[in-house]
Every structure is written in structure tokens, then in C-alpha cells.
Image (tube, rainbow, N blue to C red):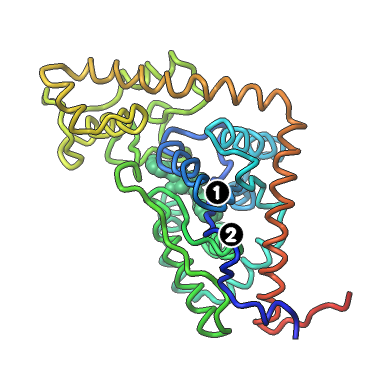
Amino acid sequence: MSDATTSPTPSPAHQPRILSGMQPTSDSLHLGNYIGALVNWVSLQDDFETYYFVADLHALTVPTEPAVLRHRSRVTAAQYVAGGVDPVRSALFLQSHIGQHAELGWVMSCLTGFGEASRMTQFKDKTSKGQTANVGLFTYPMLMAADILMYDAAKVPVGEDQRQHLEITRDLAERFNTRFGPTFVVPEPHILKATAKIMDLSDPTSKMSGSTSPDAGLLLLSDDPKRLTKKLRSAVTDTEREIRYDPERKAGVSNLLVIHSALSGTAVPDLETHFEGKGYGDLKAEVAEVVVEAVAPFQTRMAELLADPAELDRIVASGAERARVVADTTMARVRDRVGLLAPLV
Ligand code: TYM
């Protein structure tokens, strides 16, 4: 019997682990990615063993020019670091550099019912909006489950849109553990309610999305100050005058308050008091100032990182080295549990 079967899981020998990733599917992350996820990733580095990766295999579900995908993967890694992911404390890597993700994804696909996969809302949404449905898009959640379960992640910091994927991940972990014996940690989503869904500026009833929002609705972390200010000045609000947090009736104004609060650290009720008697123009101007102030140092750091791609490649190589140690152990355990013969070495 291999070591893998005798080692109990979950392993208590390390700090609880955190894992998360983003797809390199556009030329820049947007403010929803930043406020909804990246800011939380950064703060979790203090108390957990953190694994953050660029989901480049997931990005293959969207047909992309190879050179563009390579560029976007580097930009995404640079944006993680520019946003505060510390490559010394966190393992920062590319998903495709750890071949075991695809292997465990296959095992997860073999545990998933066809009907169960068909009910995934992201798949249904994307295909209904005209994205060509390849089989990779269909099995996307199983690869995501593999990403998470590979590292025994206790918590997964994501925005609200990923909740259903976390639920199927939990189901698959429990199913595997029941069928093959305790193997995987069942992960908890880590979704901070206040910032879990940043809305599209041009249609504040839809989430800000790199793939579906029009440019006017998206605040890209690579946009220059003028562009950010212009987009915020044109943000859709409502016909009232009162600056009040009410996401049901005042989605646009509420979204602006949430963005301000997340970046300035001022609580929403204090902002409501601050803006008493002021107009939407004042709110938009001040949110623009806060956004520009937050994004400026980020952009400086991003430019430095992108100017030295060799250093970036070294950062992700060293992250992959750390991730591979965990992935090797997990996959040895999984192969053994499911009954794949170990190769002679
Ligand atoms: P992705 O690339 O669509 O989004 C990256 C992260 O940003 C969050 N997010 C938002 N948060 C608040 N408001 C918004 N408007 C907004 N838009 C996006 C997302 O919730 C996410 O946290 N499937 C994942 C990538 C992935 C992954 C994983 C994540 C692959 N494997 C394993 C966690 C663990 C995705 O497409 O995220």
C-alpha cells in the first residue's frame, strides 16, 4: 500500500489553505474582480496558506488567439501582484503548469451526472447569450472543483457569481469521500456580502462582467484616469435626487456607494450622511476620485512588472514549484483511492 493511502486527509500539518483563481479572458481585470475577489485574497494572506492561480485552462473554453492568451495570462499574474498578492507568502502560478488539475478534472467529470452538469447556471447563461458551447464549457465546473480540492482548500474567496460552482465542488468532495473514503476537505465559499456583486455601470441590474458588459459599463484596472472618470460620470442612476443605499430601487446609486465604500474604507451609512443634500454629480465625481486614487499605484506597479516578463515568469515558476508538491501528493492519493494502478518507477 502506498503512503498516499495511509496518510489521513484532511492533513492538519499546515495552516488552513485558501485557493482561488481568475480567468485570463480579457486584456485586464475589472473593478468587480478587484473588489469582489482580489482585495479578499490579499487580506487572507496574513492568516492562511494561500494558493492563487491564473485559470488559463478554463480560458481555453473561449476561443482566443494563442499570442493573446499568453499575453493575458502574464497580465493577469502581474495584476495579482500589483493588487497585493505577495509571491513570497502566496504560491502564485498558472493552472496549466500543474498538469494534475486536468487529471483530477477528469476524475471529477466521471463523478458528475450529466443532468447535474446541465443545471449549472453559468453554462446555461453563456450558451443562451450566444457563446458557442464546447464540451470544455460544459465540464468547466468539474475542472474548477479539481482546482479547489487539489489543495485541500478550506475557503475559496470569490464573488457571488461563483457560488453555484462552489456548491457542486462541495457535492463532489462529499461524493468522493463517501465512495472512496475520506480524501478531500469540503471547502467553504468565502463570499463577502457587501462586495460580492459589483454592477455594470451602464446597466446596474447586471453584474459587471468582462465578457458581457459593454465598455461603458466596465471599469478596467488598466483604464487611464480620464477614461475611468468619464465612465463614472456616465453611470446610469435614477430619476430621484436622494443618495441612499437601496439596491432594489436605486441599483446605480447603491453600486456607486459600494464601490466608494470598498475603496475608501468609509461605511455606506457614513457615506449617506456625507452626501446628504448633495447631488448625483457630486457622488460620481467623488467616486471617480476614489477609484483613480486606488488604481494609480496599481497601474504603476503593473507597468513595472510587465516591463520585466522574465521576472514574472520566475515568479510563476516558483509558485508552481510549491503548488506541484501538494498536487503530486493529492493525485497519488486520488489515483490510489479510485483504483488506478501506480506505475513502476
Ligand atoms: P472569473 O475570472 O469570472 O472572476 C474572477 C473573480 O472575480 C469575481 N467577480 C466579481 N465579484 C464581484 N462583482 C463582480 N461583478 C464580479 N465579476 C467577477 C468572481 O466571482 C471571481 O471570484 N470560475 C472562476 C475562475 C476559477 C476559480 C477556480 C475560482 C477557476 N477555478 C477555483 C475559484 C477557485 C471564474 O471564472 O472567475
| Quadrant showing the N terminus | bottom right
Q: Position of residue 14 (x, y in %)?
A: 59, 61
Residue 21 image label: 1
- Judged from this view, the residue extending furthest toward the top is 226
Which three-letter amino acid code belongs to the residue tagged 2?
A: Asp
Residue 120 image label: none
Up/down of 23 relative to 148, above or below: above
Relative to residue 258, is residue 242 drawn left or right? left
Q: Where, by quadrant of the figure, is residue 26 drawn?
A: top right
Secondary structure under the numbered disc 2 in the rendered image: helix
| Quadrant showing the C terminus | bottom right
Q: Report if the CB atoms under discs 1 and 2 are less than 8 Å apart.
A: yes
Residue 147 image label: 2
Up/down of 309 relative to 23, above or below: above
Which three-letter amino acid code belongs to the residue tagged 1?
A: Gly
Q: Is mark 1 within 8 Å of ligand 1?
A: yes
Secondary structure under the numbered disc 1 in the rendered image: strand
- Judged from this view, the residue extending furthest toward the front is 13
Front-lying residue, 216 or 252:
252
Q: Position of residue 204 (x, y in %)?
A: 28, 36
